[in-house]
Amino acid sequence: MGMLDINIMKGFIRFCDDGWQQGWHERNGGNLTYRLKKEEVAEMKPFFDETPRPWVSMGVTGENLAGEYFIATGSGKYFRNVSLDPADCLCVVEINDKGDSYRIVWGLVNGGRPTSEFPSHFMNHSVRVAATNGATRVIYHAHPANVIAMTYVLPLTDREFSRALWKSATECPVVFPGGVGVVPWMVPGGADIALATCEKMKKFEAAVWAQHGLFVSGPDFDITFGLMHTIEKSAQIWVLQKSTGLPELQTITDDALRAIAKEFGVTIREEFLD
Ligand code: 2HA
Ligand code: ZN
């Protein structure tokens, strides 16, 4: 029995592998973090390092995440390699009691630090935990090609992207009835993109990063991976449809979106409908 036999760690590794298989993680692209449950931390504790590494200030504060533990992908690590050598590619970090610093308690055995987007992930966990009464545990960033392609040709508004995605596949209004937010192009890895994403994530569970990728959140691995997958599949249909060059003869109407929402008992964001 070791760290890699623990179910939640197996799930994290499988998630990374699935993202790689989908083609969303060229080179070191993308990152994943999971906020551990108390009982999962207890299961892992016997395998933590005897001496935790030093505290590292994050430059951002999430008071509602004080004392929490996260599994995170490592900065510069490749999703392609995670399942081959999890202890080299991943880490578990503990957050201090002020919610402004982390320290590594397991993993990254050959050195390194959590993902370059850790401040972004951390702040977005904080915002989503507040927005969902503690339900959110997963934040996931990937580079799915069709979502990125859309950001070159559609106006970068929440409304335009939500409508285009909802209308490209019938399941979309059920899977993300709240729609998606859109963040304009920004330098990755910094505080600015973290703050801009947080603003969107107060309202949405997913945010498109123009000319870069997609950022999603959710309560567990299945739902979060499924959200990334559903949005990218819809974007693929949108791109394929436009690529035919043929005029659009029919689509899912706004009233049809309302009807789907009613049938499936979800609240679609009415302000985005005509
Ligand atoms: O981890 O995807 O946005 C590499 C990235 C940064
Ligand atoms: Zn990225």
Image (spheres, rainbow, N blue to C red):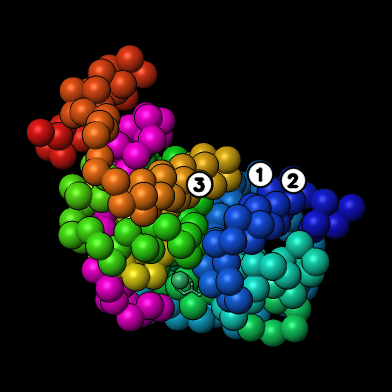
Point out residue 59 in the picture as x, y percentages from the top left corner: 37, 79
Label 1 and label 2: CA atoms lie apart by 12 Å
Q: Amino acid at mark 2?
A: Asn
Instruction: Please tell me which residue is depicted at 65% across the width and 67% down the height of the picture.
Output: 79
- The quadrant holding residue 57 is bottom left
Q: Which mark is residue 7?
A: 2
Q: Which mark is residue 229?
A: 3
N-term-proximal mark, 1 vs 2: 2
Check contact, mark 3 vs mark 1: CB within 8 A.
Answer: no
The residue carrying mark 1 has its beta carbon less than 8 Å from ligand 1: no
The single residue placed furthest to the top in the displayed view is 263
Frontmost residue, 159 versus 121: 159
Point out residue 111 in the picture as x, y percentages from the top left corner: 69, 84
Label 3 and label 1: CA atoms lie apart by 29 Å
The quarter of the rendered structure image containing the C terminus is top left
Q: Amino acid at mark 1?
A: Glu
**Ligand 2: quadrant of the figure:** bottom left
